[in-house]
Amino acid sequence: MISGGQGREVHSAAAARLGDVGQRYTSGRRALVHALTMFTGPVTVDTIRSWQPLALSSLYRNLTVLEEAGVVRRVATHDEAPRYELNEDLTEHHHHLVCTSCGLVEDFVFPPALERAVAKAGAAAGRAMDFDTAEHHLELIGLCRGCRAG
Amino acid sequence: MISGGQGREVHSAAAARLGDVGQRYTSGRRALVHALTMFTGPVTVDTIRSWQPLALSSLYRNLTVLEEAGVVRRVATHDEAPRYELNEDLTEHHHHLVCTSCGLVEDFVFPPALERAVAKAGAAAGRAMDFDTAEHHLELIGLCRGCRAG
DNA sequence: ATAAGAATGAGAATCATTCTTATTTTGGCG
DNA sequence: CGCCAAAATAAGAATGATTCTCATTCTTAT
């Protein structure tokens, strides 16, 4: 993981990874990556667009390019539209809260001890199923504060 | 959870739940539910259709109806097409393995002690985020046996 | 049996995503 | 500098999965 996660390192890492796959880190792509650092959870194409008014075709193309370069990750949460976030190794390993009422998707991190336990259990479960576990993602489904109150 | 999960109980529960929302348990819907009991993981519309050649419009409509009745659950795994499975309380609480190479999605269950630990951790993490956690789902990403060998 | 209300299926409509193509930008080089 | 070649952009067309429409068929209750 890139230290800090919010600063210049993200951009230089993005530039390097794009370079590795023969792509340029243009101002449009930089703006897109910057937009992704602004959110506390994975966001939809529409949300990105409301922040960075790019042409739709460019947005989709660049999300694909950045995904192939390992800069962003596409997340299929809940049953909504696909969402995008910066790759975990540019930010931090985390999981997602999903509010069933308003559709909010928010990042959270487990305490390290717990995280280790989950990773270990996942590896063990994988072994039992003859599956080679590389990573894991947890989703907590429930009600966010606002929806509980309302 | 309905005991056993594979037998007649699933159908009577499905009928009851449809009844609760003013829907009938027709032969087509029964066939659809039956098809879903045949698989060991959530399946795509295409897979279902290869087993039960229904009209596309009926298939989509019935999946929606069954989802609203709480009989099936729509699962957004990976970044592929949406998949459908029987609701956990008709079968068993489980998680998913996702093969990054062939796209296979397979159910697995944690040993009870581990499952309790994850549930507890999830509730605690939710509390810390001011979130009311109702359920959780874990996804293990990696390589299935066949893809590791090939 | 029969009528009223639902469910079905074929095909049309919709809409997010992807593709095409002309234009603009980028970066290297004389 | 100022051009060239390669790559990125953006507008709109094409695609394709999902949803909608509506005429027909099936259910259920009387």
Image (spheres, coloured by chain):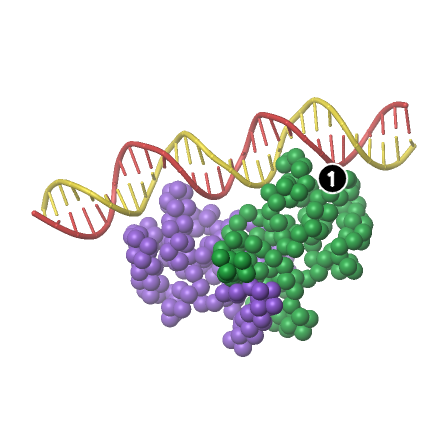
Chain colours: A purple, B green, C red, D yellow
Look at label 1 and name its amino acid: Gly
Which chain letter goes with mark 1? B
Q: Position of residue A81 (x, y in %)?
A: 53, 48
Dividing the picture into quadrants, the one containing residue A138 is bottom right
The residue lying toward the viewer, choosing from B7 and B17, is: B7
Residue A53 visible somewhere in the drawing: no
Q: Residue at x 47, y 67 (%)?
A: A93
Q: Relative to residue A139, is residue B112 drawn left or right?
A: right
Residue D12 versus residue B119 in the image, above or below: above
Q: Position of residue B17 (x, y in %)?
A: 77, 49
Q: Residue at x 61, y 45 (%)?
A: B47
Residue A49 visible somewhere in the drawing: yes
Q: Position of residue A114 (x, y in %)?
A: 56, 75
The residue lying toward the viewer, choosing from D7 and A31, is: D7
Q: Residue furthest bottom?
A: A113
Q: Residues within 10 Å of mark 1 (few under 14, many from 20)?
A: some
Circle 1 residue = B28
Dividing the picture into quadrants, the one containing residue D24 is top right
Q: Residue furthest front?
A: B150
Q: Residue at x 42, y 65 (%)?
A: A89
The N terminus of chain B, quarter of image: bottom right
Disc 1 element: helix
Q: Position of residue B147 (x, y in %)?
A: 51, 58
The residue lying toward the viewer, choosing from B60 and A128, is: A128
Question: For the image shown, how many numbered marks are present on the structure?
Answer: 1
Dividing the picture into quadrants, the one containing residue A38 is bottom left
Residue B22 versus residue A107 in the image, above or below: above
Q: Residue at x 56, y 49 (%)?
A: A80
The residue lying toward the viewer, choosing from B58 and A39, is: B58
Q: Relative to residue B42, is residue C17 drawn left or right?
A: left
